Image: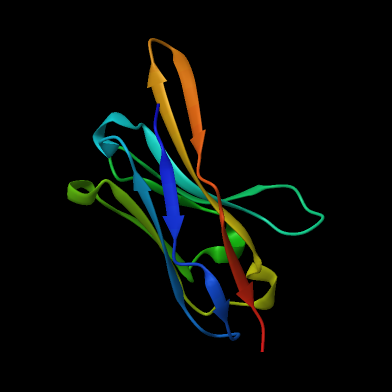
Amino acid sequence: QVQLVESGGGLVQPGGSLRLSCAASASIFSINRMGWYRQAPGKQRELVAHITIDGSTNYEDSVKGRFTISRDNAKNTVYLQMNSLKPEDTAVYYCNALRVRQNYEYIYWGQGTQVTVSS
């Protein structure tokens, strides 16, 4: 089992910045991929960004150049730095972990943190 605890959400004005943190209960070296998803009211949950165990990253097109995902292996924590925030970034942001063991995929989710971009 991997427990994920997010923090760092809040209310910010358009053009502002926030940094989300996701602390894992297990060593992130044991997790194949970690990422951030978001879900806005009335919409499906979508991938924002993910980072693999070897440091490769992938971003949803609308956040490229504005958001940066990173990891601190010593703290078992993954971050999402969000700059130039827009009202359409408003959503609940969820941390996600994918662990592959003997060809089985185990997926874990955090409880979510609200990000609201509004003037």
Q: Is 42 situated left or right of 12 in this image? A: right
Residue drawn at 30 percent across, 45 percent down: 55
**Residue under the point 30% across and 37% down:** 53
Nearest the viewer among 109 and 100 is 109
Q: Is residue 71 left or right of residue 22?
A: left
Across and down, in percent, residue 27 comes to 25, 36
Give the farthest residue toward the top.
102
Name of the residue lying farthest toward the bottom:
119
State which quadrant residue 98 falls in. top left
In the image, what residue occupies the spot 52% across and 80% down?
Answer: 84
> Which image quadrant for residue 114?
bottom right
| Quarter of the N terminus within the rendering | top left
Q: Which residue appears farthest toward the right when viewing the image?
A: 42
What residue is shown at x 39% (from left), y 32% (from top)?
A: 2
Image spot of residue 88 (x, y percent) = 69, 71
Colouring scheme, one of rainbow, by chain, secondary structure, one colour: rainbow
Q: What is the count of numbered marks?
A: 0
Where residue 20 appears, as percent x and y from the top left, is: 43, 63
* Foreground residue among 22 and 62: 22
Left or right of 92? Residue 80 is: left
Question: Relative to 113, does residue 119 appear above or below in the rendering?
Answer: below
Measured from the top left, where is residue 79 in percent x and y?
A: 37, 58
